[in-house]
Amino acid sequence: MDPITDFLSAIRTEGVFYGRIQVGAPWTPPSETGLHAGFCLVSYGQASLSLPDGAEPVQLSHGDFFLVAPGREYVLSTGGVAPASILAGHFNFDEAMGRPLADFFPPLILIRGEQPQMLPLQKTLELLAAEVDSSTTGSEMAVRRLADLLLIQALRSHITSSPDESTGRLLAYSDSQIGAALNSMHERIDHPWTVASLASEAGMSRSAFAQRFKQLMSESPLEYLTRWRMYRGTSLLRESDRKLSDVAQAVGYDSDGAFHKAFKRVLGVAPGEYRRAASH
């Protein structure tokens, strides 16, 4: 499993699709609680996208798609001209994944309608809209599956179309050497990794690997490994009834005490408390 797939499988994601919306006056998506990331496709007309960072508004035309990073809000407007039609929704995420999500997503993914990567995204969004409009047997499951596909397509399209603009984990995962080490780390999370052994996986010297890894990931290889083990642990705690000691071994810890200590340090809550909260 490649690191991007592993990351997406570890985060708890729920796609919510608003449907087809006519935008005339400034439009803000419905207020939501929790950690979420909004997305839109301009299916007709033109609109202006404003983000809360003070940057110049982004002008959007027919066929353009955007996805904002988790935790960012946005406003769409048409500047008083003819209304625009959009397909809009958002993704909900497990709030325990706030830090890695912030590191993983670029502030804004923008795919223009004329780019070849836009075609599969547009087809998926049209299928989403059709499922929401029909509300037939199985539509709810179809919407969830299509939303998962949309998120993967958006991230993949961003990497393909804007490799120089990819930042953080997206850039690291697509880096041939650092990506190789990350791939090994994710595939064998229970292995007793060291910086030297990870550098060997990357085909680099220990010092060069450590420097390049921190440059791309903003943390050391072993800091990332510890945090990733904890996030994989959250999946096991949510989705299985395995004993704490078994979960600890599955993510590379010889004792549940060591796992408990690391889990609480990284996520601010004990494993047992997290499991109880996640089950409600």
Image (cartoon, helix red, strand yellow):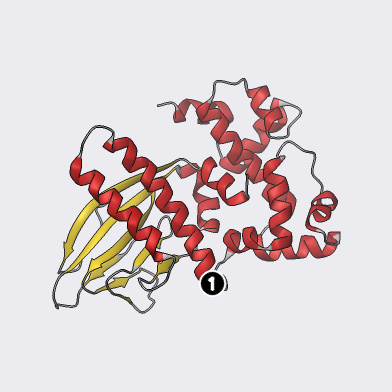
Residue drawn at the location 78% of the way across and 57% of the way down: 202
Q: What amino acid is found at the position of numbered circle 1 in the picture? A: Glu
Crowding at dot 1, Cα within 10 Å, few <14 / some 14-19 / many 20+, comes out as: few
Q: Is residue 264 visible?
A: no
Between residues 275 and 240, which one lies in front from this camera angle? 240
Q: Which residue is mark 1?
A: 165
In the image, taking residue 225 as reference, residue 103 lies left or right, namely left
- Residue at 81% from the left image edge and 65% from the top image edge: 208
Please report the residue visible at 21 percent of the width from the left and 36 percent of the height from the top: 136
* Residue placed most toward the observer, 62 or 214: 62
Image x and y of residue 130, in percent: 23, 48
Quadrant in which residue 259 is drawn: top right
Residue 35 appears in the picture as rendered: yes
Residue in view at x 51 percent, y 29 percent: 238
Where is 250 relative to 198, above or below?
above
Q: Is residue 129 left or right of residue 250?
A: left
Residue 240 in percent (x, y) is at: 54, 24
In the picture, which quadrant includes the N terminus?
top right
Q: Quadrant of residue 85?
A: bottom left
- Quadrant containing the C terminus is top left
Q: Secondary structure at mark 1?
A: loop
What percent of the width, then of the height, locates residue 168? 59, 62
Q: Give whichever of 50, 152 is nearer the camera.
A: 152
Instruction: Count how many numbered circles sit on residues in the image.
Output: 1
Q: Is 238 positioned to the left or the right of 30 in the image? A: right
Relative vertical location of residue 196 with respect to residue 166 in this rendering, above or below: above
In the figure, 258 relative to 34: above or below? above
